[in-house]
Structure formats: structure tokens, C-alpha cells
Image (cartoon, grey):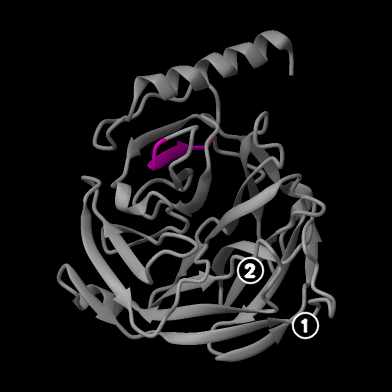
Amino acid sequence: MSILKGAKRAFLSLSIMMAGCAPFDEEPQAPLVEGDITRASWPTVVQETSGLALYAGLNWTVNDSGGDAVVYGINDQHAIAKQITIRGAKNVDWESLAQDDKYLYIADCGNNRARRAVVQIYKVAWTSLLAVEHEGSVEALRMNIRYADFPALRPRKNHRFDCEALTVVDDALWLFTKNWNNEKTNLYRLDKSAADQTVSSEQVYEVDGLITGADFDPLSRRLVLLGYDKNLIFGQSFIWLIPVEQQLLWDRARRIKLYPYAQWEAIAWNPLGDSNELILTSEKSPLLDVSIGRLKIQPDLGL
């Protein structure tokens, strides 16, 4: 990247941050640079938003480690429409949401200090969530996921058993790790119906960063991975767009930098937009308020 182009992108990012929130009911202007995010502020109750699902006209999210075992449904006016407790669940470190037509999957898979050889996924029926008017509680099925390759001597730092990204691909759950040791990601495939299962890593991908979110679009058969550079001060948020057949076609993957740089934690394809629109959420941080963002990507015939 030339110095002039880098300065232009830095100025654009700063301008977006200073301009404040763009409401989603206004048609966004075409991005000056691919990767520009149109954003709006979210309620402070979800200031640690860490997962995203889009269903029945609501944006569903959760807070991460140590928060209440609560799922929030937020409407297009950025107000809390539903606040639903998951009975019998504990938020050790909720980090991701995934969805299919019948269920919402809550991934309690955060593992910063590699203390957990077993993580949990809570499987909640959409019918039970939608039956709650505004506040209430619902039951969930608990899935226990054991890493078969977890070392006997627990690694204390710079390990590869943290995780913040879960998505549904066809009939399976795909779990992507956040590798502090090598800035790659490991893929684990999970059975959506098995309550207890032991899984091994199937593939490792060179993502050049720390992965915080994932989503799969069955129509275009593309998977998106969200992440950021390990260097937090001078780092950069990014996405990878990858076509999927039975496997990720990594030789055709495309990486896009995101502006503004923020703690973007979750991502989902917009089911109501075109096939080139993504929705993201960001935790509250020194870089940005808690936010929801909309990202238009340029069509790519190769994807």
C-alpha cells in the first residue's frame, strides 16, 4: 500500500468515526473504499455483544464472558424487543451464535487461558424464543464438545484452543478457533444432534489474524470469517470470503480490510439484503461504542 493511499484510508476511517451513527433506514452511500462499514449505536445492555443471528425480523445477540445467560432480540430501531433467559445455562464465555431454520445455537466456547478441554453449545428452538412476548425464560438442549487433541499439559498462553466463531454449514456445525499462537484457525465439524461428542481438528487455514466470527450463506455457498490482527494498537479488522463445496476452497479466498477499525466480534449474511451484504456487531471499546454495522461487498465472479 502506498503512503498516500494509506493516509486516505486512515482519514476516511477517522471521518466515519467522527460522523457518528448512520441510521439503517437511510440508504447508505456507496463505500469510498471497499470495507467501509455503515454503523449505528446499540443499547448499552449489550456492550459486550459477541454473537449475531438474524431471524424473524430481529437481530439476536448475547454478551460474552461472565454476563447473564440471556439472549437479546433487538429491532431495527435499535431497541431491545426481547430479553430471554436460558434456563439451566451458564455464561462461562458465550462467544458466538449460529442458526438454522429450527434452532439458535449459543456457543459457550471462549477459552482465553486454555482452561477448558470441554466447551458447551446451547441449542434453543426458535419457536420457544418467539413465544416470549418481551421478557421470559426458555429451556435449551446442552451439547458438550470435547477437544480430542487438547494437550494433557494445559497450555497457559499462546495456544490454539480459544474459540469465538460458530456457523451452520449444511447439516453440520463448523467451529473455527482463535489461534493466539500462530494467527491461523483450526476447523472442527460438529454433529448438530449429538449431546456429547469428541472432535478433532480437520483443517488449518492461514487467516493471518485472530478469528472472532463466522457465517455461511447457503444460497451463494460462501463462508465469511471475521477477525483482527494480533497487534491491537496498529492492527486492522478484516473479513475472509471463501467459497464452499464440501470443503473451503481456500485458493479462491479473498481478504478485505474493514473500516473503521474496531472490536468487531460477530458477523452474519443479511437475509433481507442482496447476496453481497453483511451485518456486524462491535463491542464497546476505546475505538468505538457498541455498534451494529452494515457492510456492502463488491461482487466477485470468482465467488
Residue 200 x %, y %: 77, 78
When asked about the image quadrant of residue 146, the answer is bottom right
Q: Which residues are magenta?
A: 289-297
The residue at the point 65 percent across, 37 percent down is: 232
Residue extending farthest left = 133
Q: Which mark is residue 148?
A: 1
Q: Which quadrant of the rendered structure holds the N terminus?
A: top right
Residue 15 x %, y %: 44, 17
137 is higher (above) or lower (below) than 25: below
Estimate the spatial distance between the alpha carbons at disc 1 and disc 2, rounded to whole Å: 14 Å
Amino acid on which disc 1 is placed: Ala
Instruction: Determine if the magenta segment contains residue 211.
Output: no
282 is higher (above) or lower (below) than 105: above
Q: Which mark is residue 175?
A: 2
The residue at the point 39 percent across, 42 percent down is: 290
The residue at the point 62 percent across, 70 percent down is: 174
Residue 296 x %, y %: 47, 36
The residue at the point 40 percent across, 62 percent down is: 62
Q: What is the number of callouts on the image?
A: 2
Determine whether the residue tagged by mark 2 lies in a helix, strand or loop: strand
Amino acid on which disc 2 is placed: Leu
Determine whether the residue tagged by mark 1 lies in a helix, strand or loop: loop
Which secondary structure is most common in the magenta stretch?
strand
When asked about the image quadrant of residue 123, the answer is bottom left
Instruction: Determine if the magenta segment contains residue 295.
Output: yes
